[in-house]
Amino acid sequence: MAKRITWTYRVHRDRKEILLYWKHRNQSSTYSRKLNALIKKAIDLVAAHPYVGRKTDIENVRVKLVRDYLVFYEIAEEDIFILAIWDNRRNPENAPY
């Protein structure tokens, strides 16, 4: 049975900034829509199979790769909390988890 997904405020902001960046950079929303669909598909997979992501140094926090982005999530009893979306081309010392 799939777990309930809860998005943090931070991840809503992260995703919006990423999608707006690509929309402005490409002068089109096509890539943003495709990337958003990939993120949603990955999160659906995580909901159905919570341990699919790679372990992090923090207990119960895992990460799922989506193109050039890392989706950090925490597994709880009945929920999965989506914590952050991070562009893995950025400085890893500034990564959120």
Image: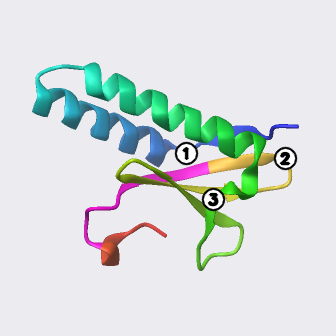
Q: Is residue 42 magenta?
A: no
- List the residue tagged with mark 1: 8
Of mark 3 and mark 2, the one earlier in the sequence is 3
Can you give x and y, in whole percent of width and height, for residue 35 in the image? 38, 33
Q: Nearer the viewer, mark 2 or mark 1?
A: 2
Label 2 belongs to which residue? 78
Pick whichever, 57 or 9, lies toward us. Answer: 57
Query: Who's the residue at 47% across and 27% down the image?
Result: 37
Q: Are marks 2 and 1 in contact (CB under 8 Å)?
A: no
Q: On residue 53, which mark appears? A: 3
The amino acid type, in three-letter code, at marker 3 is Gly
70 vs 80, nearest the viewer? 70
Q: Amino acid at mark 2?
A: Glu
Can you tell which of label 3 and label 1 is closer to the viewer? Answer: 3
Residue 18 in the image, given as x and y percentages of width and height: 29, 40
- Magenta stretch, main secondary structure, is strand
- Looking at the image, tell me whether mark 3 or mark 1 is earlier in sequence order: 1
| Secondary structure type for disc 2 | loop
Q: Is residue 30 left or right of residue 46?
A: left
Cα gap from disc 3 to disc 1, whole angstroms: 18 Å
Magenta-colored stretch includes residue 88: yes
Residue 60 appears in which quarter of the rendering? bottom right
Q: Position of residue 1 (x, y in %)?
A: 88, 37
Q: Which residues are magenta?
A: 82-91
Mark 2 to mark 1: distance in Å? 16 Å
